């Protein structure tokens, strides 16, 4: 078992078995004893209930017998009166006769009093006790009937009164007889063990000795019964005894107490029966004691039998339990010595456990030898790449941590090179993975041959390799290794019928302090490698802090751009596009600005490149289209219906299948003419995916939306593709327009591009116009539209509307107000 503080307590199986058997016998004996004891109690209850019913029947029989005897006595007395008064009808004769015969009548019939009454209730003669008012009231309220009436009343004593109708000399009379309860009680008390108490009705204001507010008129055995009566009156209520009866313990004496009313009246006199059942209760107590003794003897016997029969096997099991830890400790020989095999004709489970333990020990001993052999092999393989045989990433982390710990003591500095083969995925896709694996093996061999003896080449996975350079004294040491690698990889590689020249991009990270972590150094080299890839094939870059800042900035941009869209931190600024040469306003280009709550204003060139390859660029593009549609709608409501709005789209967004439905939705939502929306896309992104670009352009043209090719001339221009694309506007990049005033190649290129666009039926927009001379020169070349700082920097919507209100009549954008516009656009 386990304690709350985590400690464990060992309890041997032999003690658990002994306790379990004892508990089983205890529970079984308890159940049987309880059942038997319950049966005895039920038997006792049955006997008591039988006695109660018998007493109730005896009481009814005694009363009925007394009433019947009274009826016989009344008939005989009536005959006697008739004989005495047969010669006269004088009523006074009745009284004289009773006075003369009363001693005999009282002695013979045991009467307490007697009265002769007319049917109207008039007393004609009486003998014995005097008539009181309560008796007269009973006479008057008793119905006239041929049947006798009786009642039991208690005054100084309890008596039974019987009113018997009779005929004397042919005339109806009533005989009132009063008898003591002696006969009733003698008949009722069939068992001398019963004690009887006669109690009168409940009194409102009892005086003298009373019990439950009832006067005691008779008690069978005052010496023994009076203490019981007093205790019962103290502990139990009259209603409790009358309703439940049952067995009560008073002064360590057990008695059954019952109440039997003497009449069917709410508050009638009653007989209280006290039945001493102490002997029966002693019998039950003796039974309980005998059961406990029997149970104790059974437990002792069962415990002895358990020890006799099961102790030896359980002890053997305990010995085996103590030996099992030897298996975990690999002490196989000690285990076999402590528990040797024994030959036996009769075997049991313990013998089987012993045999299985020896077999398990043999098997584990054999497996341990095998595991030791395989572990040594796995430890060797765990640090090597299975394909190239080079140390793997696990070995890299181990060696890198060890080498960094030596910086400043053994090595002045170390360098980590991160290599990624250029276009390796294309080789895998075209030649297959088998040829790709062969190429990796060849590259691994050449890298190993290009490094110094103290350096180590690792394979990170895929086509990524890392080289740990130790003992670096200067940058020249690293450059020598890099040039060796480039030279070795320049040698053609023969893969089947193909000859390939493999190039690689290399990132280098220096470690000059032992405080740098291994994973940080790998991250720095990785960042430098991606910078080398962006610079072109077969190149290398050394890690700088600026790379880390750019990487962190990109991560921040990717994390915050979603909140920027949701919280509307992005705003659209407008730069005017004017006609040449009159400078009349033709439209605006929407340029996005990010007002970051912590970093302030972020220009698009600082965050768009970081998200242009992710889904976030589509979300930003959708946001710009929605805001641009709303802004164009507000311009049209102010009366500028002929203006258009140019919106830049990324290549990824331009090829997105959701673009067309979104444009349809915006045009319908803001009730815009399709030609008022100009979607700009760069020349380079179009040329990269010409088929998708042409399909998307055709769909947009079917909507009536115009398309512009932006930054023309900066990419790999293809005149054949340009002729096929269904665009409307060609925008000349500022790198050409900035040199248009000089008699240089750029001015001839601009002139040629304008002529080419016109020949194709397209409109030309010149970007980056900063001085009026540039505008005039371009106008002479035939350029239709221009935009640049000559006219305005990008402005927010409020400032744009201020200027529109100023030029509402002429519609000429005021280039001469450059200082004011510069201030407005700052």
Image: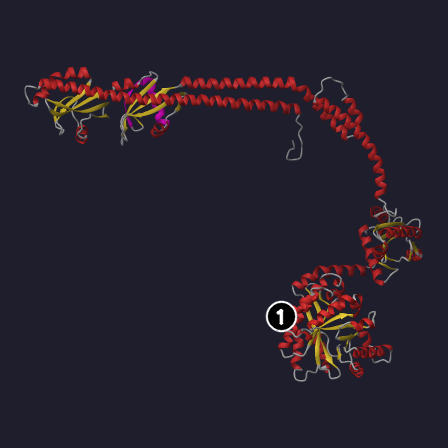
Give the prevailing secondary structure in the magenta stretch: helix
* Residue 729 is one of the magenta-drawn residues: no
Q: Quadrant of residue 140?
A: top left
Observer able to see residue 122: yes
> Which percent across, then down, holds residue 720?
82, 72
Relative to 415, residue 806 above or below = below
| Quadrant of image for the N terminus | top right
Q: Which residues are magenta?
A: 214-235
Vertical side of 662 occupied by 349: above or below:
above
For mark 1, does the 10 Å Cα neighbourhood hold few (<14), some (14 to 19), or many (20 or more) residues? few
- Answer left or right for 365 relative to 564: right
Looking at the image, which residue is at 74% across and 71% down?
A: 680
Q: Which residue is mark 1?
A: 669
Residue beneath the point at 32% across and 25% down: 259
Task: Give the x, y percent position of residue 549.
Answer: 78, 60
Which part of the image, by quadrant, shows the C terminus? bottom right
658 displayed left or right of 511: left
Residue 471 in view (yes/no): no
- Image location (x, y in percent) of residue 7: 67, 33
Label 1 SS: helix
């Amino acid at each position: 078992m386990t304690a709350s503080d985590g400690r464990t307590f060992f309890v041997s199986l032999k003690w658990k078995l002994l306790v379990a058997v004892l508990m089983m016998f205890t529970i079984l004996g308890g159940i049987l004893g309880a059942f038997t004891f319950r049966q005895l109690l039920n038997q006792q209850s049955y006997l008591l209930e039988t006695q109660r019913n018998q007493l109730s029947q005896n009481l009814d029989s005694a009363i009925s017998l007394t009433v019947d005897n009274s009826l016989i006595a009344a008939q005989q007395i009536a005959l006697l009166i008739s004989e005495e008064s047969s010669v006269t009808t004088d009523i006074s004769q009745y009284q004289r006769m009773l006075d003369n015969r009363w001693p005999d009548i009282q002695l013979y019939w045991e009467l307490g009093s007697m009265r002769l009454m007319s049917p109207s209730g008039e007393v004609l003669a009486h003998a014995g006790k005097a008539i009181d008012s309560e008796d007269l009231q009973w006479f008057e309220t008793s119905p006239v009937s041929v049947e006798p009436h009786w009642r039991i009343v208690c005054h100084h004593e309890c008596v039974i009164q019987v009113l018997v109708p009779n005929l004397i000399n042919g005339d109806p009379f009533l005989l009132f007889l009063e008898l003591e309860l002696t006969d009733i009680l003698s008949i009722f008390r069939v068992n001398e063990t019963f004690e009887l108490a006669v109690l009168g009705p409940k009194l409102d204001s009892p005086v003298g000795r009373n019990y439950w507010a009832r006067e005691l008129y008779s008690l069978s055995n005052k010496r023994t019964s009076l203490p019981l009566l007093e205790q019962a009156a103290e502990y139990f209520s009259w209603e409790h005894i009358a309703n439940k009866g049952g067995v009560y313990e008073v002064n360590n004496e057990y008695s059954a107490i019952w109440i039997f009313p003497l009449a069917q009246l709410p508050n009638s006199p009653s007989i209280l029966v006290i039945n001493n059942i102490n002997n029966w209760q002693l019998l039950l107590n003796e039974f309980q004691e005998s059961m406990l003794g029997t149970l104790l003897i059974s437990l002792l016997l069962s415990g002895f039998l358990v020890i006799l029969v099961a102790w030896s096997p359980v002890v053997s099991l305990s010995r085996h339990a103590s030996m099992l830890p030897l298996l975990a400790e690999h002490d196989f020989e000690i285990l076999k010595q402590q528990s040797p095999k024994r030959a036996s004709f009769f075997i049991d489970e313990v013998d089987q456990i012993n045999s299985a333990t020896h077999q398990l020990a043999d098997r584990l001993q054999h497996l341990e030898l095998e595991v030791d052999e395989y572990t040594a092999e796995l430890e060797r393989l765990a640090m090597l790449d299975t394909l190239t045989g080079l140390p793997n990433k696990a070995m890299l982390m181990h060696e890198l941590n060890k080498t960094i710990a030596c910086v400043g003591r053994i090595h002045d500095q170390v360098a980590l090179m991160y290599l990624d083969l250029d276009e390796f995925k294309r080789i895998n896709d075209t030649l297959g993975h088998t040829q790709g694996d062969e190429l990796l093996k060849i590259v691994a061999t050449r890298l190993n041959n290009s490094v110094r003896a103290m350096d180590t080449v690792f394979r990170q996975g895929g086509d990524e390799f890392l080289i740990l350079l130790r003992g670096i004294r200067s940058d020249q040491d690293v450059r020598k290794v890099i040039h060796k690698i480039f030279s070795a990889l320049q040698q053609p590689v023969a893969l089947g019928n193909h000859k390939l020249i493999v190039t690689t991009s290399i990132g280098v990270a220096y470690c000059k302090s032992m405080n740098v972590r291994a994973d940080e150094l790998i991250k720095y080299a990785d960042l430098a490698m991606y910078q080398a890839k962006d610079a072109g094939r077969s190149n290398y870059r050394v890690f700088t802090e600026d790379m880390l800042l750019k990487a962190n900035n990109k991560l921040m941009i990717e994390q915050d751009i979603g909140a920027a869209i949701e919280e509307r931190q992005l705003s659209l600024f407008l730069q005017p596009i004017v006609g040449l040469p009159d400078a009349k306003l033709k439209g605006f280009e929407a340029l996005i600005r990010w007002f970051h709550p912590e970093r302030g204003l972020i220009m698009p060139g600082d965050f768009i490149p970081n998200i242009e390859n992710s889904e976030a660029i589509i979300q930003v593009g959708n946001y710009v289209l929605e805001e641009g549609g709303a802004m164009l709608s507000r311009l049209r409501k102010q009366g500028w219906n002929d203006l258009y709005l140019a919106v830049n789209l990324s290549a990824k967004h331009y090829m997105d299948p959701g673009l067309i439905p979104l444009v349809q939705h915006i045009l319908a939502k803001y009730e815009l003419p399709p030609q008022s929306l100009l979607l700009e896309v760069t020349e380079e992104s179009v040329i990269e995916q010409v088929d998708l670009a042409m399909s998307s352009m055709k769909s947009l043209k079917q909507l009536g939306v115009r398309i512009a090719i932006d930054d023309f001339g900066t990419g790999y221009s293809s005149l054949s593709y340009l002729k096929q694309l269904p665009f409307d506007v060609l925008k000349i990049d500022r790198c050409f327009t900035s040199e248009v005033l000089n008699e240089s190649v750029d001015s001839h290129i601009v002139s040629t591009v304008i002529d080419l666009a016109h020949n194709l039926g397209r409109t030309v927009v010149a970007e980056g116009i900063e001085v009026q001379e540039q505008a005039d020169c371009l106008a002479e070349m035939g350029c239709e539209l221009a935009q640049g700082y000559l006219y305005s920097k990008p402005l927010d919507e409020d400032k744009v509307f201020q200027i529109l209100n100023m030029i509402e009549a002429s519609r000429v954008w005021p280039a001469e107000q450059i200082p004011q516009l510069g201030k407005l656009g700052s």
